[in-house]
Image (tube, rainbow, N blue to C red):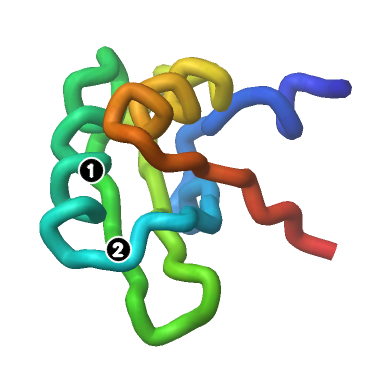
């Protein structure tokens, strides 16, 4: 793998993840846990697509491991899968 595939890098577009969480309160719980990670700027929830997406943006000069983000979702009882652009 590479730096781009295994981490969330600072950018205007962020990194998109699909999740198996469906309820608004579950999605907010996941977002709150992810925001605890040092370097996370914000988490945006998109419920108009399937599967539901979370877009995570990092602060300038912060690189965040995807595995750290996924672990926060697992702690809440859900999964996050990175969506890769073609």
Residue 36 sits in quarter:
top left
Q: Nearer the viewer, residue 18 or 74?
A: 74
The percent coordinates of residue 26 (x first, y second) are 21, 52
**Residue placed under numbered mark 2 in the picture:** 45
Q: Nearer the viewer, residue 21 or 13?
A: 21
Distance between the Cα atoms at labels 2 and 1? Answer: 8 Å
Identify which residue is drawn at 44% across, 68% down.
52
The percent coordinates of residue 77 (x first, y second) are 35, 35
Q: Nearer the viewer, residue 11 or 29?
A: 29
The percent coordinates of residue 5 (x first, y second) are 74, 32
**Residue placed under numbered mark 1 in the picture:** 31
Residue 62 image label: none
Whether residue 78 is situated above or below residue 22 in the rendered picture: above
Identify which residue is drawn at 49% across, 28% down.
70
Marks 2 and 1 close (CB-CB < 8 Å):
yes
Dot 2 or dot 1: first in sequence order is 1
Whether residue 56 is situated above or below residue 66 in the rendered picture: below
User: Taking 43 as reference, is 8 left or right?
Assistant: right
The N terminus, quarter of image: top right
Mark 2 neighbour class, 10 Å CA radius: few under 14, some 14 to 19, many 20 or more: some
Identify which residue is drawn at 47% across, 49% down.
14
Identify which residue is drawn at 33% across, 66% down.
22
Residue 58 sits in quarter:
top left
For the residue labelled by badge 2, is the local secondary structure a helix, a strand or a loop?
Answer: strand
The percent coordinates of residue 60 (x first, y second) are 36, 27
């Amino acid at each position: 793998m590479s730096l781009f595939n295994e981490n969330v890098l600072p950018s205007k577009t962020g990194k998109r993840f699909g999740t198996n969480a469906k309820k608004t309160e579950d999605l907010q719980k996941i977002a709150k846990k992810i925001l605890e990670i040092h370097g996370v700027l914000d988490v945006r929830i998109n419920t108009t697509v399937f599967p539901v997406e979370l877009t995570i943006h990092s602060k300038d000069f912060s690189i965040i491991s995807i595995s750290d983000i996924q672990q926060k979702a697992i702690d809440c009882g859900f999964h996050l899968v990175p969506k890769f652009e073609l």
